[in-house]
Amino acid sequence: MNFFEYVNNELYCEKVPLKNIADEVGTPVFVYSRQTLERHLRVFSEPFSSVSHLVCYSMKACSNLAILKIFSRLGAGVDIVSGGELYRALSAGVEPSRIVYSGVGKRASEIDEALLAGILMFNVESEAELELLEIRARSLGIKARIALRVNPDVDPKTHPYISTGLQKNKFGIDTSRALDLYKQTLKMDWIEPIGIDCHIGSQLTELGPILEAVEKLVGILEQLRSDGIDIQYLDIGGGLGIPYDQEEPPMPSEYGAAVVERMRDLGVTLILEPGRVLVGNAGILLTQVLYLKKTKKKLFVIVDAAMNDLIRPSLYDAHHVVQKVTLRPSQSSPDKLITVDIVGPICESGDYLAKSRELGEVAFGDHLAVMSAGAYGFSMSSNYNSRPRAPEVLVDGENYYIIRERETYADLVRGERIPPHLQ
Ligand code: LLP
């Protein structure tokens, strides 16, 4: 459930008409709802309340400091994948003891930063990483707490670009190899194995693969315990899907109940790394119609947001509902619907936000809301075509706050230099 709703034919975010934000801040702009963010974290966490657990928000989904603050005030930690994300997390005041660090390509400098910060644990993705971690931990004199990220080889049944738990994917360590590696850590003075981790993919709409992966982790955990290795954390990653269109992903309550049932008696702390399910439907991308263009085959609605702002449709053929911000009552009858492609100004045919969509009549200057754009929206945006990145706005009740300014043309060339001999 989210707090984007029509009141008298005007789309609101909480108590703020989106039209006001579009007029005052300009478009394109990302708008997030604080109430929705908090509700999503509560609804997600609730089913785990009977067991020891830690929600580590996977901040790659949307890493604005204000969003991190909202979650960390409610007790969440974060799942990070880079030194930059560590920097953001610490800047937002996230407790280092609630940070887990995943990712296949951690650099030595990033490992050092995380050791010095005192994060909870590294989710180690290869033997080579484990060796480097031991070297860095020894040189800093700080023990590295680790989980091995195992690759459980289950098919998450999602888009191939966002599957991560199959043997052909670059992520994690083969389950058959994991036991040996855990034993190896016992000979490493600066490594302390405290957890087991996996993450099988994103936008998962079925429980089966998640439970299959949990089952494999539990099998490894039991084996490790019988070998005398004390595992305290079971990190099952993120991945729970959201309804973008007709999908019917499991409810957090179903997901939680099934996971809790399997791990209740294991005496471990469960770590969860949700990203999309917390922020996806808590954010939208607001845009304005620039032109209508009718060709022999299509009616294009050209808007001021593009694939550099929201790349999901171009990259994954992802579906985002597009709604008019202001409905004209006379247009509510279905026969007035028109079929359009909603496209951006970027010079690529792949630059679209929605294809073959039915929309009430639109005209120059109308505002449109691209829904479910809170996850992997701004965080995947770029400056392609030298387009300044959009601002981010947080709505909180009757007020809204700019939580990231619109980039300027000067921002676009910041740090660039013309060598003197070319001047
Ligand atoms: N944990 C790890 C180790 C991950 O790699 C990810 C996402 C998550 C947690 C959070 O997954 P979530 O709960 O958000 O599904 N850009 C793609 C999604 C890529 C996901 C990458 N990893 C998209 O727009 O659909």
Image (cartoon, rainbow, N blue to C red):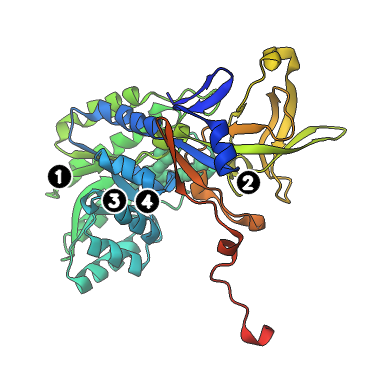
Estimate the spatial distance between the alpha carbons at disc 1 and disc 2, rounded to whole Å: 49 Å
N-terminal-most mark, 2 or 4: 4
> Assess mark 1: CB under 8 A from ligand 1?
no
Estimate the spatial distance between the alpha carbons at disc 2 and disc 4, rounded to whole Å: 30 Å
Task: Name the residue carrying label 2.
Answer: 307
N-terminal-most mark, 3 or 2: 3
Q: Secondary structure at mark 2?
A: loop
Crowding at label 1, few (<14), some or many (≥20) Cα neighbours within 10 Å?
Answer: few
Task: Name the residue carrying label 1.
Answer: 225
From what the image shows, is residue 14 above or below residue 198? Answer: above
Image quarter where ligand 1 lies: top left
Quick one: quadrant of the N terminus?
Answer: top left
From what the image shows, is residue 60 above or below residue 323? Answer: below
Identity of the residue drawn at 31% across and 47% down: 78
* Amino acid type, label 4: Gly
Residue 323, given in percent of the width and then of the height, sits at 61, 27
